[in-house]
């Protein structure tokens, strides 16, 4: 199951995000979306969780949770989000 994580702190990296979600189960891929020129995070990411139940638990625990005083969004990624941001 692919998850969308929004409103991330700009200084968060893939390893930190991986560590947050691996506690729930196996993580396949973590991709923070970055500006093509500056390589600065755009504040959102996609995470592939290999177990659906683990993904649903992560969504329940993290959606509207807080990282560095920022309220993040975590939900199931829609294919249109992934296509639009894969360029």
Image: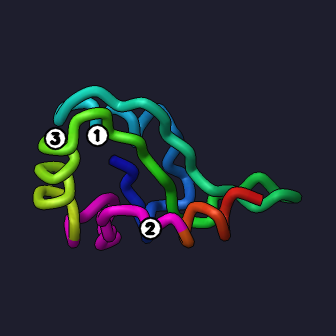
Q: Which mark is residue 78?
A: 2
Residue at (48, 35) in percent of width and height: 29
Residue matched to label 3: 54
Asked if the magenta segment contains residue 87, the reply would be no
First in sequence: mark 3 vs mark 1: 1
Residue 19 image point, x, y percent? 33, 32
Q: Nearer the viewer, mark 3 or mark 1?
A: 3
Q: Nearer the viewer, mark 3 or mark 2?
A: 2
First in sequence: mark 2 vs mark 1: 1
Residue at (49, 49) in percent of width and height: 12
* Left or right relative to 23: residue 4: right
Residue placed most toward the observer, 33 or 67? 33
Residue matched to label 1: 20
Residue at (12, 60) in percent of width and height: 60
Name the image quarter holding the C terminus.
Answer: bottom right
Q: CA distance from mark 2 to mark 1?
A: 21 Å
Judged from this view, the residue extending furthest toward the top is: 26
Residue 37 image point, x, y percent? 88, 58
Residue 51 image point, x, y percent? 22, 35
Judged from this view, the residue extending furthest toward the front is: 79
From which residue to which does the magenta span run?
64-79
* Residues at discs 3 and 1 in contact (Cβ within 8 Å): no
Q: Which mark is residue 28?
A: none
Q: Nearer the viewer, mark 2 or mark 1?
A: 2
Residue placed most toward the observer, 15 or 2? 2
Residue 35 image point, x, y percent? 76, 61
Asked if the magenta segment contains residue 74, the reply would be yes
Q: Quadrant of residue 65?
A: bottom left
Callout 3 secondary element? helix
* Left or right relative to 37: residue 61: left
Q: Quadrant of residue 49?
A: top left
* Left or right relative to 12: residue 73: left
């Amino acid at each position: 199951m692919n998850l969308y994580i929004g409103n991330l702190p700009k200084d968060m990296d893939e390893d930190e995000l991986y560590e947050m979600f691996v506690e729930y189960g196996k993580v396949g891929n973590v991709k923070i979306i970055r500006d093509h020129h500056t390589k600065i995070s755009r504040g959102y990411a996609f995470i592939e969780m290999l177990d659906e139940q683990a993904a649903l638990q992560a969504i329940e625990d993290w959606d509207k949770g807080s990282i560095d005083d920022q309220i993040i969004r975590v939900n199931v990624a829609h294919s249109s989000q992934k296509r639009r941001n894969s360029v």
